[in-house]
Amino acid sequence: MRNRLPSALWTALLALILLAPMPAAWALKLDVTRFELKNGMKVVVIPDHRAPVVTHMVWYSIGSADEPIQGKSGLAHYFEHLMFKGTKKIKPGEFSKIIKRHGGVDNAFTTRDYTAYFQRIAKQHLPMVMEMEADRMQNLQLSEKDVDTERQVIMEERRMRTDNSPRALFAEQMQAALYVAHPYRRPVIGWMDDVRRLRLADAMEFYHRFYTPANATLVVAGDVEPQEVRKLAEKYYGVLINTAPKAAHVRTREPEPLAARRIVMRDARIRAPMVERIYLAPSYRTAKGARAHALEVFAQALGDGATSVLYRKLVVEENLATWAGAWYSGDLRDDGEFGIYASPAPGVTLEKLEKRMDEILGEVLNKGLPVAALERARNILTAQATYERDSQNGLARLFGQALASGYTVKDVLEWEERIEKVTPEDVRDAARAVLQLRRSVTGWLMREKPKHKDKIAASARQEGRKSEEVAK
Amino acid sequence: MRNRLPSALWTALLALILLAPMPAAWALKLDVTRFELKNGMKVVVIPDHRAPVVTHMVWYSIGSADEPIQGKSGLAHYFEHLMFKGTKKIKPGEFSKIIKRHGGVDNAFTTRDYTAYFQRIAKQHLPMVMEMEADRMQNLQLSEKDVDTERQVIMEERRMRTDNSPRALFAEQMQAALYVAHPYRRPVIGWMDDVRRLRLADAMEFYHRFYTPANATLVVAGDVEPQEVRKLAEKYYGVLINTAPKAAHVRTREPEPLAARRIVMRDARIRAPMVERIYLAPSYRTAKGARAHALEVFAQALGDGATSVLYRKLVVEENLATWAGAWYSGDLRDDGEFGIYASPAPGVTLEKLEKRMDEILGEVLNKGLPVAALERARNILTAQATYERDSQNGLARLFGQALASGYTVKDVLEWEERIEKVTPEDVRDAARAVLQLRRSVTGWLMREKPKHKDKIAASARQEGRKSEEVAK
């Protein structure tokens, strides 16, 4: 329901927010207009007249979790790349150049739930941008060569971002272990063997099936008025005909978790080992009552930043960890995740650190968090939201992401109020329901000791002991 | 490459085999004829004139790992059920009744790699059986009602065989954790949520795509001659036209394993806890050199039966376990599995048992198994093969399974000779290459203690300790 800022930035902002009395102007009145075109394309307009620019985004409610074919993971992200090839009107690779030539920037991104394309540009170029974006929604022209070239690009991207990064590989293994059946377990970029297999026919089938107005949300934020955007949207997007029915989001529902899972990954490139646990948690969309909002407050109080319980205990007071935290990703279409993590201080084993982390969790779950900590967490969350809403890009993303993930404008607008209403009991109940071992995967990321490379049989229990040497 | 008999039966047979000098007649000369119809359908004929009956099997090289659509697992098995609905000539449900009326038996089964249909019947009915089997390969008629009814049957089957059985659920969780990306991770019967979603259109698409002569192998064993079968096969199957190209077996290749995995599953219904470890291992098809044959010998010597190393040490000598064993499933199309397991004796914890199991493995991997043990393992394996080949059904299955999984008649015929040539060095090298923790998942199946039901945070390290109470 909101974008997360890097912790470091937040630590800095936090001081400002908590020290200064908050001026009323921070709480921006949100002026959001939402309507729908006849073809089912959703439109959100957010006027922001502080500068003569617009942010134009088209969000498709199609992410990697919607990829339809077995053995073809990575197709949603792959296709995002292909959208920068040409149409009859725009030559291959020209799209971004034209935006740039007009002083704008553009980009795109793919997640498990959606794929989004955006441009930020001087307001007078909005019609041009709309024309180009509408054009590539239906008139994309792909050649075998385009698809082959881009496959190499993606494979290189995977090598660089995932295979070259032990942390990224670890995250991938954790996801694959957390979800037994739901497609969130697959990496967005795809398994290498699947990427290798993607062909022009796969791309075109994906395009015709999913890149259609009924699956799209247009977000325009900036120096515009709703009526103006409506006219343009009808002109450029309203004339498009759906090439397929609205996406059904065929995804295997994750079965009720049965078994606690653990992974131990060793990599010679690791300098800072870590222990992480991820629990399957409801999302804002799948949660009942206040549960998701309560988990958000809980994650904030438990582990977001230097004032949080986990950080204060593990890092500041007990010197067991160099960093520690917690997070909740509740803004998914299906069930989401609640995570806790810590990296051991020199001389501390992962075993000891995990044990202490669990003790702290146990205390928190039994006794609840101090009311003051929850109060502070709620304040930080709402202040953070206010801050994000002060950014044109932040606002546009907030609504785009929400609508593309199955949420409503109302969900977004009410978020703050519902966060403020979260009670200590809500937090305790939500935490107890979610933080159960059988709902979780626990991972140890450790440095590989060369002499163990060829070691062929040792129990993971033994691995635990070995960590004493590794974590130094 | 061979069917496995229940251990109990083998313990009994073993005595016979090892005590008696083996008569030459046991080593049946295999009289196998293999040819192909013009449409690509493979045919294997195995004359066996001991009784005036035939075993007729059609094997499709399509299993659950070939299911093409995300979120529709279980389709291969589901479709197997639907093949017993009707055609223009045969009314729904009549197929099996007709076989029965003619004194025969019939059935079908689905695995990860193939789906097979078989009948055993008096030889004079072979033409009728062929006509009916060829008929349903291309003329199946399915109604919405057939498909809806059968969905309920499958869901009930899943409830009974899987959800009602902690061991089956545990096996399902182990598979899901062992394979990170390859479709062998999915249960053959499918995830319940996916089964719920299977529709007539899915079934028909699956049928037209895969149930075609190029994906089929006909095996006829019994009181027949190859020429006779060839004529019949050409008459009934040879006239069929392929409705789709030969299956490409689009399956995500399992990435090189990166992380040791563990699962702990608790279930109140468990009486005998167990520890199991499964390693990703090459199959006969993916292995280089003698590796798969060596793993077969290793599994036999290490853990198949009461004379095996694991059983002797853990159960007989040290009284730590009530049963223990090892297995190798090497007869898959893609990489297979090597497993070891044990169930603790009263008062023994899973932690202690796993530790001892690992020590024994460590010794075996360092020092190798005694030459006599390997010699005995090779003898048992070849004797077992000889025994299986003495059964008409066993022989038919042996070749059908092999051909449907991408093997050749030659692979089957040479198996025994290659097993006999396996050296202690082959076994040691194969075992060392495969039995690495990062290639494995280790699972503990434990009794749930009611008072822990609501326990919400405890490390798996703590779980280890708790097992002391549970295993009593």
Image (tube, coloured by chain):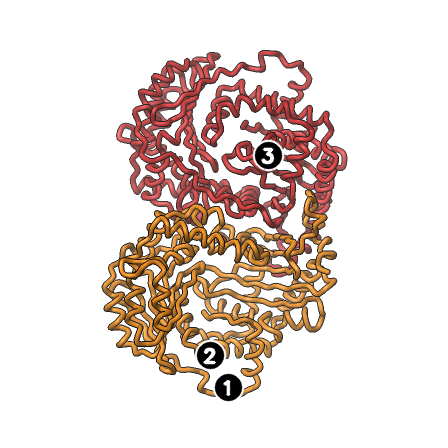
Chain colours: A red, B orange
Q: Tell me what residue is drawn at x 59 percent, y 52 percent.
A: B261
**Marks 3/2: CA–CA distance:** 59 Å
For the residue pair A45 and B472, the one nearer the viewer reads as B472
Relative side of A354 to A182, left or right:
right
Q: Is residue B32 visible?
A: no
Q: Are marks 1 and 2 on the same chain?
A: yes
The residue under label 2 is B386
Q: In the figure, B70 relative to A222: above or below?
A: below
Write down the quadrant of residue A227 in the picture: top left
- Identify the residue at image location x=60%, y=41%: A278
Callout 2, which amino acid? Thr
**Quarter holding the C terminus of chain A?**
top right
Q: Residue A467, image x and y in percent?
A: 68, 50
Q: Chain of mark 3?
A: A
Tag 3 residue: A328
Q: Quadrant of the N terminus of chain A?
A: top right
- CA gap between label 3 and label 1 equals 67 Å
Which mark is on residue B22?
1
Do marks 3 and 1 share a subunit? no
Q: Are marks 3 and 2 on the same chain?
A: no
Contact check, label 1 and label 2, Cβ < 8 Å? yes
Marks 1 and 2, how far apart at CA: 10 Å
Point out the residue furthest to the right here.
A317
Which residue is pictured at 75% across the width and 35% down the height? A367
Q: Position of residue A216 (x, y in %)?
A: 39, 29
Q: Looking at the picture, does residue A68 appear above or below residue A305?
A: below
Determine the chain carrying the residue at label 1: B
